[in-house]
Image (cartoon, rainbow, N blue to C red):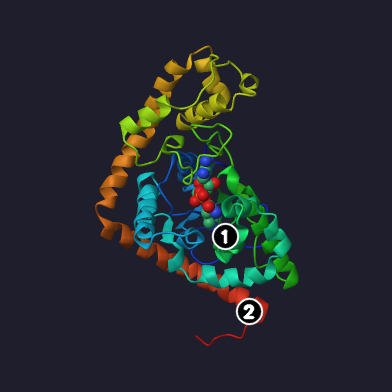
Amino acid sequence: MAPNIRSTQQGIDPMTSGSTPQKQGRILSGIQPTGNLHLGNYLGAIRNWAAMQADFQCLFCIVDMHAITIWQEPAELARATREVAAGYIAAGLDPAANTLFVQSHVPAHAQLAWIFNCVARIGWLNRMTQFKDKAGKNREAASSGLYVYPNLMAADILVYKATHVPVGEDQKQHLELARDIAQKFNNDYSTELFPLPEPVIQGPGMRVMSLRDGTKKMSKSDPSAYSRINMTDSEDDIAQKIRKATTDPAPLPGSVEGLEGRPEASNLLNIYAALTDRTLAEVLAETEGWQFSQFKTRLTEAAVGVLGPITAEMQRLMADPAEIDSVLKRGAESANEIASAVLDEAYSAVGFLPSGR
Ligand code: TYM
């Protein structure tokens, strides 16, 4: 599962301070602390990060500044921020070997984002489908932060000169924009400051769909609790949600082509493949001809087997917020060290006078 990817950038040293020469590049990725972490976040993101952590220098962020582009209750935002940190650690991201931190603890993200607000074109932002989805029909009432959200995301990545960004498929368009911003900045200011970050979008978990509707993404904002499995769900919750998951009447096919036009079957099988670390074809060879009832029992066992220990560890960590906060404090220190150096380079490229600090 751990991808063996080299940076495609030539002539640019993406690694500033803190790099280890044998690593294949630098990863930055993040999750918004809104609502609960769910199976899509785990299979589409965190699990891949865990598989890559040995080969890359990694920074994993909790993007609280992105979260407030939509209204968040302050106490709930604080709780969810710690919960995402607990999820990272419980899912195997080693806080001693990686940098785990909170976005708002590193001011350089916002500072570089301002420059990117001046680099990115309005026409680029107008094409972003996430803004259209999240703003809904009443765009005039959306926050201006929601509109420039992708510029902040580009800053999150480029302020570390990250070379690789592992995400789920829904983030593809934002990453293309981040590359466009890096390219335009480099062109406008005649520099090679920013490497163009490579999206890493892979595996059967890159697109986990709702358990109620196989054509809709599994999401924190879906009003139906039965549409998603949360990383904090009990075994009983998981079993019940899988039992109630939408299916179709036919038995399971033996080939990937046989899943054509069967979004729910396709989704459940992809989830099973991701949970058991196999390809879809391998899984289909096991389950060919099964009825959904038999398959759902197996899927539940797999989900409980993977998520059970993570949930227990998250609960243990959440009982000790001071421990989480100290991991995040250390993370912010090392993130700040890299980010402030890159910000200085960007300020100088733009023509801002040195502050004399
Ligand atoms: P967010 O918080 O919506 O999701 C976090 C990560 O989980 C992945 N993901 C999924 N993967 C597969 N199936 C799903 N149903 C599913 N739902 C979510 C997302 O693709 C993502 O990898 N804009 C980002 C956060 C962000 C970021 C960044 C990411 C801010 N700055 C810099 C990478 C780099 C977001 O809203 O993710």
Mark 1: C-beta under 8 Å from nearest atom of ligand 1: yes
Type of the residue with mark 1 = Met
Label 2 sits on a secondary structure element that is helix
Using the image as rendered, state which of residue 121 and residue 200 is in the foreground. 121
| Farthest residue, direction top | 289
Residue beneath disc 2:
348
Displayed quadrant of residue 332: bottom left
Q: Is residue 55 visible?
A: no
Q: What's the mark number on residue 189? A: none
Circle 1 residues within 10 Å: few <14, some 14–19, many ≥20: many
- In primary-sequence order, the first of circles 2 and 1 is 1
Type of the residue with mark 2 = Ser
- Please tell me whether residue 290 is drawn above or below residue 103 in the rendered image: above
User: Is the Cβ of the residue at disc 2 closer than 8 Å to that at disc 1?
Assistant: no
User: In whole angstroms, how far apart are the C-alphas of marks 2 and 1?
Assistant: 21 Å
Q: What's the mark number on residue 153? A: 1
| Farthest residue, direction bottom | 356
Mark 2: C-beta under 8 Å from nearest atom of ligand 1: no
The image shows residue 172 at horizontal and vertical percentages of: 63, 48
- Please tell me whether residue 41 is drawn above or below residue 143 in the rendered image: above
- Please tell me whether residue 144 is drawn above or below residue 205 in the rendered image: below
- Please tell me whether residue 164 is drawn above or below residue 274 in the rendered image: below
